[in-house]
Image: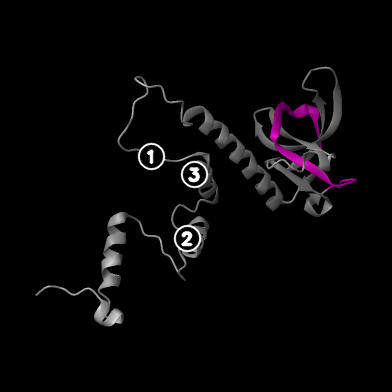
Amino acid sequence: MSDIGALALVKYEYTDKSRCKVRFGLITGEFLNDYQVTFITKHVGKYSHEETSIIIDNEDLASGALKQKCIVRTHKTFWIDKSQCKKVGALKTEVTDKILRFNEKHSVGNYYDFAHKQRPYIPGKTPVHYAGRVFDEKEIQAAVEASLDFWLTEGRFARQFQTEFASKIGVKHAFLVNSGSSANLLAMTALTSHLLGDRRLQTWR
């Protein structure tokens, strides 16, 4: 059985290696004899501005107890031998799920910066393509998020886009289709609808 989502007392080593301190950590991964542990701190005010941080309290626990509200800094993780962790509780499944997704989002952002981020243009050296894919880390993060849901067809992101797009252009409804060709067919079908009366497109005979 997986220990992901468990709270544990862990001996943290300071970044500068100057000393160690036993604190709460959240187990967010495991491989062979090691746990991936995500940093938890009581300094809520200090780190609440971080978009990768999530505040937790006793309402978020499935077992165990916290003395006060804490904050999970989802981007701050390290690996440690399982024997160095003492499990003392666990988060609710939905809270753990949210934190794991934040971890993935941060990792995907790092990968985009490494593999896809546009490099500075150098005249005479940088190739100029007439067409290509245009995207940033947000598109990749959304694709990963949908894959984590394992909702690989129209789902919550499609519904969100339809609603926001309709609002943007000032109409009641907007509908996504699978391709530009399908969009053209729907457009022609709508423009030749009898509901338009004399304004509809007429076919030549």
Specify the label residue 198 is tagged with. Answer: none
Disc 2 on helix, strand or loop?
helix
Point out the residue furthest to the left here. Answer: 205
* Residue position for label 2: 165
Task: Look at the image and say whether residue 70 sits in the magenta stretch.
Answer: yes
Residue type at mark 3? Glu
Q: Earlier in the sequence, mark 1 or mark 2?
A: 1
Q: Position of residue 191 (x, y in %)?
A: 28, 71
Residue 82: x %, y % from top left:
74, 29
| Location of residue 30 by image quarter | top right
Quickly name the residue at label 3.
139
Amino acid identity at mark 1? Arg
Front-most of 70 and 48?
Answer: 48
Label 2 neighbourhood size at 10 Å, few (<14), some (14-19), many (20+)? some
Q: Quadrant of residue 198?
A: bottom left
Amino acid type of the residue tagged 2 in the rendering? Phe
Residue 6 x %, y %: 75, 42
Kindly give the residue lying farthest to the front in the view shown. Answer: 123
Name the residue carrying label 1. 133
Q: Position of 145 compared to 186: left or right?
A: right
| Front residue of this view, candidates 89 and 163 | 163
> 46 or 71: nearer the eye?
46
In the displayed structure image, the side of residue 123 where residue 68 appears, left or right: right
Q: Can you see residue 124?
A: yes
What residue is at 65 percent from the left and 28 percent from the top? 32
Mark nearer the N terminus (2 vs 3): 3
Q: CA distance from mark 2 to mark 3?
A: 16 Å
